[in-house]
Image (spheres, rainbow, N blue to C red):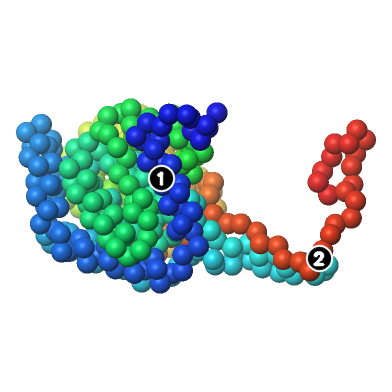
Amino acid sequence: MTSESTSADSPVLAAARRAREASAALAPLPRRAKDAALLAVADALEARAGEVVAANAEDVERARAAGTAESVIDRLTLTGERIAAIASDVRDVAGLPDPVGEVVRGYTLPNGLDVRQVRVPLGVVGIIYEARPNVTVDAAALCLKSGNAVLLRGSASAYRSNTALVAVLRDAVAAAGLPADAVQLVPGESRESVQELMRARGLVDVLIPRGGASLIRTVVEGSTVPVIETGTGNCHVYVDAETDLAMAVGILLNSKAQRVSVCNAAETLLVHQDVADAFLPLALAALAEAGVTVHGDEAVLKASEGSAATVVPATDEDWGAEYLSYDIAAAVVPSLDAAVAHIRRWSSGHTEAIVTTSQGAARRFTQLVDAATVAVNASTRFTDGGEFGFGAEIGISTQKLHSRGPMGLPELTSTKYIVTGDGHVRGEATQTVGGAGPSR
């Protein structure tokens, strides 16, 4: 039984039903109408920044009183400058091409039928995310641009901030002539409201969780609504036998230490044994200077003797860890194939990198490694919609169906076929004995 057959709606299902109606109104809108709404949103965010900052201050005060880590509080905090940057991002989304109506493929059959596969909105998109109120605006802007209604379920720690932001968004959208219910905050702060959203099959077309491994696993395993699994990142950097040592150190350092709390930061270093004696002293010194603790195998521990690096013995938990901190696991491997085997066992399927001067090694690595992004002589940190030239992203998918990798506007669409004829009818269908058979 789908949620559409429920006789008495809860507040969450009522919101989902309103979103469904709004999505029908959004789907046929031309680009100019959606862009006008986005520009109105950007202006409203700047004009009403004061009330958003005031609401955010309450969330920050509560978080500090609860002993929340300062790194989390920083992600939670909104300032006038940050809101101005968010508004600028919304204007950037307005400037992106509209994917809706794009012809993915089109052709005319020998019988004269015209067949076109075109992009259409997904419909109602639910976003479940943690204490990053900027996601509230980013997700709403991307969904509006792609013709989708959005149901936003942020964490309780950002509830006041999200409430204020959604009020601004809804007012601006309505003033631009679009249905206000195209953007809604999921009612409630309890886990029950999340569970109801996850079970709103038939009203919500897809859920996208953004956050840590526990949140993503909960949504993937407990939802009856289709889920696009955005990824945790146990990303690897493999340094091949044939390599440029200076380049390898630079890529390693950027992948690990440029920003540690993100899913595309490197969490494991693998080094070919033929280059380990030359590379590890350079790598350990660079990691030590960056303040990174290395969780190493026996070969790495031996190479660290007498160095300034902080190196501790690695365990199986380290090989599977997404640290999101100044920590990295490290091992020496006997071959490229051994590196690939290690990655296959422990990778989360996000981003894997090889540093090599060998075209053959690069080709074999990219063929054998199964991940959303495989980088050759480039930092893992480039796996990002903005860096890929998408303009923005809703998340990074580590699954294989519908989308994979950074998800921009096209990934927030599905497709439908439009078949145009001129009185075309089809001949008698071919059937097998008993009347059952292919629809041919």
- Total marks placed: 2
65 left or right, relative to 418: left
First in residue order: circle 2 vs circle 1: 1
Q: In the rendered image, which quarter is residue 86 located in?
A: bottom left
**Mark 2 vs 1: CB contact within 8 A:** no
Pinpoint residue 315: horizontal percent, then vertical percent.
31, 29
Q: CA distance from mark 2 to mark 1?
A: 38 Å
The residue beneath circle 1 is 18
Residue drawn at x 37%, y 60% is 178
Instruction: Please tell me how crowded label 1 is: few (under 14), some (14-19), or many (20+) other residues with Cα within 10 Å.
Output: some
The residue beneath circle 2 is 423
Residue drawn at x 34%, y 34% is 11
Residue 246 appearing in the image = no
Residue 83 appearing in the image = yes
Pinpoint residue 244: horizontal percent, then vertical percent.
35, 62
Q: Residue furthest front?
A: 7
Q: What's the amino acid at mark 1? A: Arg
Q: Is residue 237 above or below residue 15?
A: below
